[in-house]
Amino acid sequence: MDLLEIRELRHFVTVAEELHFGRAADRLAVAQPALSKTIKRIESRLHVTLFDRTSRSVVLTPAGAALLEHGRHALNAMTVAVQNTQHATGDAPLRFVIKPGGDADLLSGILAAYAEQPGARRVDILFSGATDRTDHLHDGRADAGLLYAPFDDLDGLATETLHVEDRVAILPEEHRLAGHDIVSLGDLADETFPRWPGVPGSGSGPEITVASELIALVRIGRVVAVLPRSLITPVPPGIVCVPVPDAGPSRIVIARRDDDHRDHVTALIAAAASLRHRT
């Protein structure tokens, strides 16, 4: 038997990302006791300790950190292998990655414009985490995607700007700055900002992976944030958005790998760019 099965590796990576067995079990739709047994079985088989566990915390050991790094690569490689096999027929769907709620209402127009192109394929929508859309493009899990500049790393990607917008401070409605017409970055210098996974120096507060977590923490006054306006539209109850002019604009771009010149991907990029020129 293999030392580690794909299912077991996926379970380990999920626990390592969450550092919480309950949340990991929810993500995997498995019972928490069964997940704990899986991790213990992996540790026994590999003769290592992957997590230091107490009643209040779960922390990766050096061995666990090493398995997480290489395990992610292995899972990505498996995903790409399966998808590329499925795409070998030549008429497979085009894979388009976006952040949930992060399309600024552009997606439906892009899909409609692309559907008018000769030879248009079905488009499968992939939903990414907070900061890993570029990974989807570079490792082949996605053919194209919507990214936010300057937040996402665009190195090695060909892009077309589709939308430019301002950035706003996301504040609880009772915040001292909530009634202002505008605020500056200096006004927010002493505030606590969230940490985003994979974004060094993004903040010193709690780590945030999805928008719902951010809204909940802003609403109770734990953090504030400065984000593109479209990511917080419509504005949830209990939240106020105030423009931050000196934060500079944000761009939504459609991106592909700069060495990917396949006709169906080029057609999608062209269809999206045509919407910009119509507005």
Image: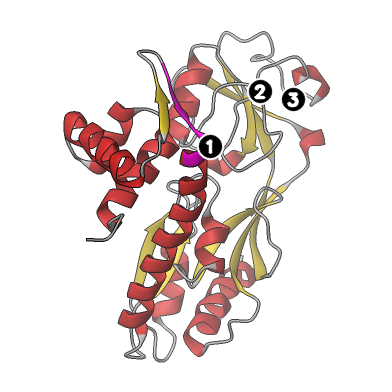
Q: Distance between the Cα atoms at labels 2 and 3?
A: 24 Å
Where residue 207 sits, quadrant-wise, is top right
Q: Earlier in the sequence, mark 3 or mark 1?
A: 1
| Nearest-to-viewer mark from 2 and 3 | 2
| Nearest-to-viewer mark from 3 and 1 | 1
Is residue 267 visible to us here?
yes
Q: Residues within 10 Å of mark 1 (few under 14, many from 20)?
A: few
| Residue with the mark numbered 3 | 182
Q: Residue at x 25, y 32 (%)?
A: 36
Q: Which residues are magenta?
A: 57-63
Q: Residue at x 35, y 68 (%)?
A: 124
Compared to residue 143, the image places residue 69 above or below, namely above
| Residue with the mark numbered 1 | 62
Q: Residue at x 66, y 23 (%)?
A: 204
Q: Which mark is residue 166?
A: none
Name the spot of residue 278 as percent of width and height, x first. 60, 71
Which one is in front, 55 or 1?
1
Q: Amino acid at mark 3?
A: Ile
Compared to residue 239, the image places residue 228 above or below, namely below
Q: Is the residue under label 1 in contact with that under label 3 (CB below 8 Å)?
A: no
Q: Residues within 10 Å of mark 3 (few under 14, many from 20)?
A: some
Q: Describe the element under mark 2 as helix, strand or loop.
A: loop
Q: Residues within 10 Å of mark 2 (few under 14, many from 20)?
A: few
Compared to residue 70, the image places residue 33 above or below, namely above
Total marks shown come to 3
| Residue with the mark numbered 2 | 204
Name the spot of residue 78 as percent of width and height, x first. 37, 67
Q: Amino acid at mark 1?
A: Pro
Query: Is residue 185 found left or right of 67 in the rendered image?
Result: right
